[in-house]
Image (spheres, grey):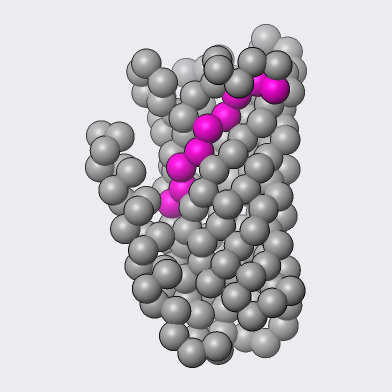
Amino acid sequence: MRRAFLIGVVLTMITGLANAQTAREHRGYGYGFGAPGASVGDGGTTATLHVGVGGERLVYKGLGAGGEIGYIGPMTGMGSGFGIGSGNASYHFRTATSSGKLDPFLTGGYSLAFRNEVASGFKVGGGVDYWFKERVGLRVEVRDHYFPVFRSTNFIGVRIGLTFR
């Protein structure tokens, strides 16, 4: 199952990158991020760090689909973390074909945590891409991953990274 998910993420990213057309017709995005955050739940709060890469493709006006893969763990012991992959739907309030440097968006979807075993969950978030160059921008986002099997623990992070098209 992990292999199929990883193949889906890679295909999504390749599709987005391969579709870069003229300067005004960008429909695909790629991004990398680091996200300081916290796991908040019944066991208290722990500082975490989430790093990863992803991509998305606008499929109709501001509506997009994408995926990402990353790693999340406690800041004091990153070796005790786990891999996390997600498939998402997003809505961009300013589409890639519109003029303007700010591109606010909302996102949500399925999350899969994996280490020795797997756990299913979901995530929601929102943020903004700031395009300081034609093809390169700053991505700032707040994300909350929730896995019911982890006893009501939310993994909340402020993601900061680069996005490209």
Residue 49 appears in the picture as rendered: yes
Main secondary structure found in the magenta portion: strand
Q: Residue at x 61, y 35 (%)?
A: 50
**Place of residue 108 in the rendered image (x, y in percent of width and height, measured from the top left):** 53, 50
Residue 148 inside the magenta-drawn segment: no
Image mark count: 0
Q: Quadrant of residue 130?
A: bottom right
Q: Quadrant of residue 139?
A: bottom right
Query: In the rendered structure, which segment of residues is drawn in magenta?
Result: 67-75
Image quadrant in which the N terminus is located: top left
Residue 68 inside the magenta-drawn segment: yes
Q: Nearer the viewer, residue 118 or 21?
A: 21
Q: Is residue 149 left or right of residue 142?
A: left
Q: Nearer the viewer, residue 156 or 101?
A: 101
Rendered position, 140 above or below 101? above
Rendered position, 11 above or below 52? below
Q: Is residue 160 left or right of residue 31?
A: right
Q: Residue at x 37, y 73 (%)?
A: 18
**Place of residue 64 in the rendered image (x, y in percent of width and height, measured from the top left):** 47, 66
Residue 88 appears in the picture as rendered: no
Q: Nearer the viewer, residue 4 or 119?
A: 4
Q: Residue at x 36, y 63 (%)?
A: 14
Q: Residue at x 66, y 31 (%)?
A: 49
Q: Is residue 141 left or right of residue 113?
A: right
Rendered position, 160 above or below 3? below
